[in-house]
Amino acid sequence: MESEASEIVVGLDIGTTKIVAIVGRKNEHGKLDILGMGRSESIGVSRGVVSNIDKTVQSIRLAVEDAENKSGVEIRVVNVGIAGQHIKSLQHRGIRVRHSVDDEISQNDINMLIDDMYKLVMLPGEEIIHVLPQEYIIDNEQGIKDPIGMAGVRLEANFHIITGQVAAAKNIYKCVHKAGLEVEDLILEPLASSEAVLSHEEKEAGVVLVDIGGGTTDIAIFQDGIIRHTAVIPFGGNVITEDIKEGCGIIKNQAELLKVKFGSTLASESQENEIVSIPGLRGRPAKEISLKNLANIIQARMEEIIEHIYYEIKNSGYENKLICGIVVTGGGSQLKHITQLMEYVTGMDTRIGYPNEHLAKGNEETLTSPMYATGVGLVIKGFETLKQKTASNTGEVVSHSKKQKGSFFDKMLGATQKFFEDGENN
């Protein structure tokens, strides 16, 4: 089991509407073979953040059992995504002065720079989740992508630092732990989604990834192959369902069905005379809802979400440098005419992102749906961590994913391990 387990990676996407566990393995061409996928309804999560531990644990168990049955793999360790309104990103520069000009710059120097970033003082209750080096400067020589092997005394780097609330991260750990699993890595969800749906060329040319989930909309902006901006907006498909529920006077399940089956984000594309009849509750008369009216409700809320997205794009300062425009993914991207509305509001070229870029042929059709972008991305990110670890074990250089854990993860796990054990003994 050990040797097999070493090359199997599990992504666990704890979303607001669904929890998905995806078991993947790399094939000989470096593509992902999905061995099994389990999903369950997510009950204890709101707006991307765990709001009820026990319910979330139940949902995680269901999804993981489902994935185990389908893949025949026993799941112990997972790569989990984190999202929510509390996620913030900032830019920071790190400097390291080296003693000798003769020694080449090594991975160790970079790891030390990254380690220093973890020592930055955050606001109370906030913790650094990711430290992403953007570009390096060696002895005032700008714009170096990979400094390893170069000579120089003064090594500087610009970092993209992503922070989140300690409490939100702890609650994710707690849920996963109570479901009998271990966390291998905690990964920002828009980073995972972008791994699944964007190509290297798009990241190079400049692109905005927009992942519209149930509770949150995640944004990641790339340009010149570097992550430039990340943000999480606390609105998603669920607020659209709520609006339909209120606007049409129907129950939530009916509103969700109406949205998925007949929803459009452009009222101008709907005919005046198209009407859907919704059965009344307990013998009450049926309700007749015009699709034009439905599209008006959806369009109003969608425009608001897109305005938020556009604000983040302008805020990043890269608005005019994004040749590839916007890639929309996530369950919310399946609404009809969404690309047209996006293009209309932002004036930027838009396409829908399907997570089939890295998938091997012959995987289930359902997996290529945009709603599984985050789950597939978490598996891809898990393989990256694995690769860094193996490289570090053979080359005896401390892998910086391991290093990253040293600060964020060990501190957090150390403090919470005891907490779990105490709680379970009581």
Image (tube, rainbow, N blue to C red):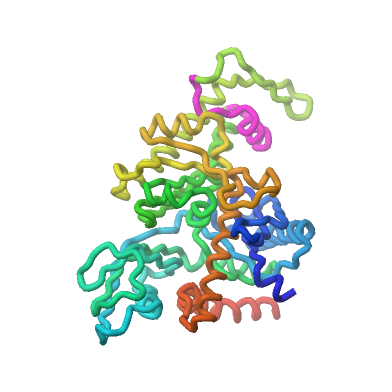
Relative to 155, residue 15 above or below: above
Can residue 283 be seen here? yes
**Residue at 46 percent of width and 54 percent of height:** 85
* Picture quadrant of residue 126: bottom left
**Residue at 59 percent of width and 47 percent of height:** 356
Residue 114 image point, x, y percent: 38, 74
Residue 365 image point, x, y percent: 68, 43
What span is colored magenta in the figure? Answer: 248-268
Residue toward you, 195 or 54: 195
Residue toward you, 227 or 211: 227
> Any magenta on residue 260?
yes
Which quadrant is the C terminus positioned in?
bottom right
Residue 308 image point, x, y percent: 40, 42
**Residue at 51 percent of width and 54 percent of height:** 195
> Any magenta on residue 388?
no
Residue 316 image point, x, y percent: 32, 50
Residue toward you, 182 or 85: 182
Query: Which residue extends farthest front?
Result: 29
